[in-house]
Image (cartoon, rainbow, N blue to C red):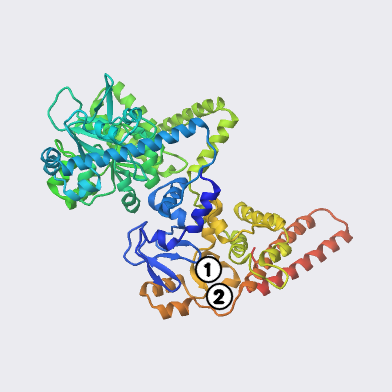
Amino acid sequence: MITQNTIQQILDRLDIIDVVGDFVKLKKRGTNYIGNCPFHNEKTPSFTVSPSKEIYKCFGCGKSGNTISFVMEHEKYSYIDALKWLAKKYSIEVEETYVSDEQRQQYQTADSLYIINQFAQQFFAKSLWETEEGQDIALSYFKERGFREEIIKKFQLGYSPEKSDAFAKEAMAKQYNPELLVKSGLVVNRNDQLLDNYRGRVIFPIHNSSGKVTGFGARILKTNDRAPKYINTPENEIYIKSKILYGSYFARTAIDKADECLLVEGYTDVVSLHQAGIENVVASGGTSLTVDQLRLIRKYTNNLTIIYDGDGAGVKAAMRGLDMALEEGLNVKLVLIPDKEDPDSYVNKIGAAAFQDFVKTEKKDVILFQLEVAMKDAGNDAAQKSTLVNRMAETISKINKAEDFTKQQDYIRQVSEILKIDEAGLTALVNQFIRDKIAAMEKRQAGVSEQEKADNVRKAEESEFHDATYNLLFKDDLQEREIARILLEYGLKPFDENRLVAEYLFDEMVDDSLMDNMDVLKMIKIFKDAFAVNTNLPDKNFFIYNEDQVISTLAVSLLNFPYEESGRWRKTAALSTGYQQSLFKQSYEDFMRVMSQGNEDALEKFSKIDEDKTNDAVISAIKYLRLRKIKRMISDNQIDMEKPHTAEELIVLASTHSYLKNEEILITKELGTVILR
C-alpha cells in the first residue's frame, strides 16, 4: 500500500484545473471553469469544475467527483493506480508500506518485466522504421493491410529482425537480467545461448489499462506450415492472458462515451477499426471469453456487441462465454460479418460509415440467435429438441434475476412462443435451474471459513467505487446531509466569539439517534473525535480526498453546485430546506442558460449574494433536527395515549401533546415551511 506520507504529498500538490485540463479544454466562467464533458457526447458545455472546492460536476450526465476520482473515472484506474499516475505527474516518489520478502520480490520482478517490455517495444519500433529490413518486409506488410503510418505509431507496432539473436544481443549489451528476459518470453535459452523468440515477425504490443506494455503478439510473415501463425507472451507476473483484452487501453474512453463495447477476435481487426474511426473496440486475442475479460468490459459499459466472422467457427466462438456474459449482467448482441470476410477486411472493403451502419442494422439478440442455430441442428429429432429446451432454460436462468427480472420474463415468453411450448412450464424449468445454482453455491459456501467470507466482502467493497450518494433522497435524509454539508463548508469557521460552527452544532444537536444516514453519522463522528482531542481538525479536503471512498463520494456530493453563495457553491438537491428555498428562486434551467451563453455579468449577478447567511443556515439545520425530535415525541406520546391510563395520566398526556404541537407549529413558522408528516 502507498504510505500516508506519499498520499499527503500528492494531495498537497493536486490542482484540479491542472489535472482535468490534461483531458478537457476548460474555459473560465466566473469563479469556475466549464468545458465539454469527457464522459458523454455533448455540444453545449455542461461540465463544470470548481477550483475552490476541488470538485467537478457534469449537469448533463450527472457524473461528479474530486481530482482523484476524475482520474479513476476517465482512465479507468483503481484508486492506487490513480495515485501513482498523479505521483508521476507531479514527480513525487511513491513510498509503500511494509511488504513481505516474497511480495517485494514479486513487485521487483513485475517492475523489471515492465522495463524490459518497454525496451523491447522501442527496439521493435526502431527495427520497423529505421532498418532497411524492417521497411522492406514489415512496413510494406502493414501498408498492404491498409494501415497508415499514424495508426502504426499509435499502437506502437514493430518488427523483430530475422537474425536469430538481434534483440538478445542488444538486451544483454544493456545488461538486462537473462532470467527475466526468458521469463518475458522475448528470448529463449537453447544450449546456454539466448535466442530471439519472435524473429522475422511483426509485433503487436499488448498494453494494460494504464498503458504499460505487458506482453506481445508476434505474427509470422513467411509461409511456414510448422511455425504457429501467432506467438504470444507466456504468462508471468504481469501478463495473464485471461485478464487482458487487446486494445482496451486505447478504447476505454470511446467505450465509456458510446456506452457500448465492440468485441472482435484479432489484433488487426482492432487496428483497422480504430483507423476507420471506430474506437470502442477490443479483441479477445482469438481465445474464449473469460470472466475476468467480461468484468473488464463491464468496468466501461454493460452493453457488449460481439463481431465475429460469419462462418461456423465464428458462430461457435461467439456462443462460447455467452452464459458467463449473462451472469455478469451484460446486454449481449451479435453481429456476423459476411462469409470469407473479417472485421479488418470488411471495414476496408465497405468503408467506416457503411460498416457502422452494418453493425447497427445487423445486431442480433444472442439468446434468440442461439435458439435459431440450435433449432436448425435439432431438426425433428425429439431427443435433441428436449436437450434444446433444457439448454435454453439454463441460459435464461443465467440472467441476473435481481437486476433484470423483466428481461428474463421476456425471454421466457419469446422462447416458449418460438418452441411452441407452455410458458408456465418453461418458467418452472428456469426457476429449477436457478434453485439448483443457489443450492450449489450454498454448498460451496458451507466449506468457506468466516475469515475467507470476510475477506471476500472486503475485496468486493474495495473493488467498487461507491456512487449511491448521488441518488435522490428523502427529505429527512436531505436534512441530515445539510448538517454534514454545513460541517464541511463552515465547520471550522467562527460561529460566535467563543465557538466554531462545528462546536455550536455539537452543543445544540439534540440527539444523534434521530439521524439515519450512517455515512453522515460517520462524518459527524470524525469531527467529534477530532474536537475531543482538539488536534488535526479535519478541513474540507480531508473528506474530499479521504481514502474511504464512501466518505469521499459523500463529501463531493454535498459540495456539488450549481448555485454559488458568496463564492461558495450550493448543492441543488438541498433546495428542499426553507432557508435555501428563500435564497435561490431561480431555476436550474435558467442557471444553465446563463452558463451556456457565457454572459459574465449575468453570471456574477446570478450567483452573487451579498449577505453572509452562514449562521442562518446553521440555526436552520438545528431547528430541523429539533422539529424531528418533537415529531418523534408526538408520535410516541400518541402511541402512549392509546394504552389504558388513569384520568390523571390522560390529562398529563393530553397536556404534553398540546405543548409539543405548539412547539412544532412555532418551529415550523420560524423555518417558513410546512409541517413534515
User: Can residue 412 be seen?
Assistant: no
**Residue that lies at the very extreme toward the top in this rendered image:** 191
User: Can residue 488 be seen?
Assistant: yes
Q: Is residue 197 above or below residue 588?
A: above
Q: Position of residue 664 (x, y in %)?
A: 71, 68
User: In which quarter of the view is residue 286 placed?
Assistant: top left
Seen in the image, is 114 located left or right of residue 461? left
Measured in 3D between alpha carbons, the distance from the residue under mark 1 to the one under mark 2, in whole angstroms, is 10 Å
Tell me if label 1 and label 2 are in contact, CB under 8 Å.
yes
Determine which residue is flagged by label 1: 570
User: In which quarter of the view is residue 45 placed?
Assistant: bottom left
How many numbered discs sit on the rendered protein?
A: 2
Seen in the image, is 399 located left or right of residue 669? left
Q: Looking at the rendered structure, which numbered label has been put on residue 583?
A: 2
Q: Residues within 10 Å of mark 1 (few under 14, many from 20)?
A: many
Q: Amino acid at mark 1?
A: Arg
- Residue at image point 62% right, 72% down: 614
Q: Position of residue 511 (x, y in %)?
A: 72, 58
